[in-house]
Structure formats: structure tokens, C-alpha cells
Amino acid sequence: NVMRIAKPHKLWLIYWSKNMTDFVYPEGYQLFAGVDEVGRGPLVGAVVTAAVILDPNKPIAGLADSKKLSEKKRLALAAEIKEKALAWAMGRAEPAEIDELNILHASMLAMERAVKALKIQPHFVLVDGNRIPPNLGLPAQAVVKGDSLVTEISAASILAKVARDQEMEALDKKHPEYAFAQHKGYPTKLHLEKLAELGPLPEYRRSFLPVKKALGIEG
């Protein structure tokens, strides 16, 4: 739950996690966007990001780190976020961009794209992790474990996770022999076996070591 305490000329927003750890939002701002990414680790597909500005008048119960929610709960929350948020937007960086820039810089670019796609410009951006994308052009703060501490980041993590999982399910329908719906592109034992047996598709990230090995490229 979010507790909002109105004081003269100030809006304090305090989010209480399950451990009663408090996150105090920066003073002097009203519209906060949360941004998160999903898909740094997989060998295939885009890194997908989302940015969300929640509506304080339309609270959403059950927001949490997307990885800790069941698929059914994520899907229900994603629909509710899209319906109730003041604004939400998606971003992405494709495998070719990941190979060109590296996964860290591609993730930063994808987060910038999500924030810039918002129909309402936020006053402040809260970013999951320990790095702020360099070209946001807005005041921002990185929040370690933000997807468990900040409701806006939790909402963004849910939208990004649902979108990327759906992309992997679509790829699975095109190439069922790779079992993408099972491993979602992550380098599991099953995925590495399929990759060695079948070789990489164009959607693979060719700069990632297991894909290089499958292509017979050293290093």
C-alpha cells in the first residue's frame, strides 16, 4: 500500500514493503514514473522495458516484483495497470542493438525509450537497479531492488515481464522445437541443449557466449 501524507507545499509518499522498509519519495515532485527492464539474461529476443505513472486516486492492490508473482496474477495486474495508470509505455532494444552496444547500454537505451514514449512527462523517474540511463533528460534516482520497494517500478516490471513472456510464447509457436515457452530464452540446461542441437535463429544475441559457441565463434 502507498501512504500519502499531504503537508503544506509538500507531498510525501511513503511505500511500505512487506518488511516494513520505507522508501521515501524525493520531495518537491508530484508525477513519478517507474521504469524497469526484463530480459538482460536471455540468449534470444529483445530486452523489454516499461515506464508507468500511477494514478494516486486509483490504487492497485498486490503490486510486487513481477518475478514473485504467478503468471495468472501478472496478467491480471498488467490489465489493471493499463486501465488505471495515468500513463504507461513500452520500450525495447533488439538483439542487433544488444550485440552492437552490449546488454547494459542496450538496457539503458530501452529504458530511455519507454520513458520518452509516455504520453505525460513525469517530473521524476525512479529506475530499478543501481544505474540511471544517461539520456533520460529528467531528474532521476536509481533504486536497488526497486521492483520490491516502489509501486511505480513494480508496475513497470509487471508490464515488461508480461510483454516479453508473450514474445517468447509467440516465438515458441513459430519454432516449437526450441521450447521457448518453457525457458523464455534464458540459458537453462534444456535451452543450451536445444541451441547446440539446432543452432541459433536470427533472433539470437550473437554476442552472448553460448550463441558464439553454437556459431563456432571463439571468445
Image (cartoon, rainbow, N blue to C red):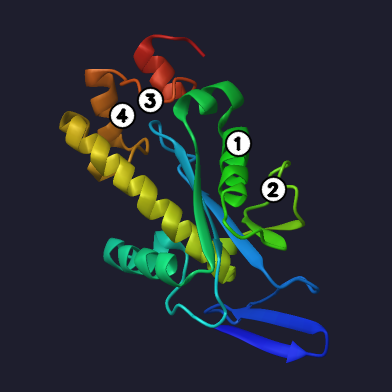
- Identify whether 104 is placed above or below 1: above
Labels 1 and 3: the sequence-earlier one: 1
Q: Residues within 10 Å of mark 4 (few under 14, many from 20)?
A: some
Residue closest to the eye, 48 or 21: 48
In 3D space, how far apart are the residues under numbered discs 2 and 3 (Cα atoms)?
A: 26 Å
Which structural element holds mark 3? Answer: loop
In 3D space, how far apart are the residues under numbered discs 2 and 4 (Cα atoms)?
A: 30 Å
Label 4 vs label 3, nearer the camera:
3
Q: Position of residue 33 (x, y in %)?
A: 62, 62
Labels 4 and 3: the sequence-earlier one: 4
Which residue is under mark 4? 192
Which residue is under mark 1? 104
The amino acid at mark 3 is Tyr
- Identify whether 5 is placed above or below 66: below
The residue shown at (43%, 60%) is 158
In 3D space, how far apart are the residues under numbered discs 4 and 3 (Cα atoms)?
A: 12 Å
Residue closest to the eye, 57 or 175: 57
Which residue is under mark 3? 204
The amino acid at mark 1 is Leu
Q: Is residue 209 visible?
A: yes
Q: Label for residue 131?
A: 2
Q: Residues within 10 Å of mark 3 (few under 14, many from 20)?
A: many
Is 197 left, or right, of 25 in this rendering?
left
Q: Residues within 10 Å of mark 2 (few under 14, many from 20)?
A: some
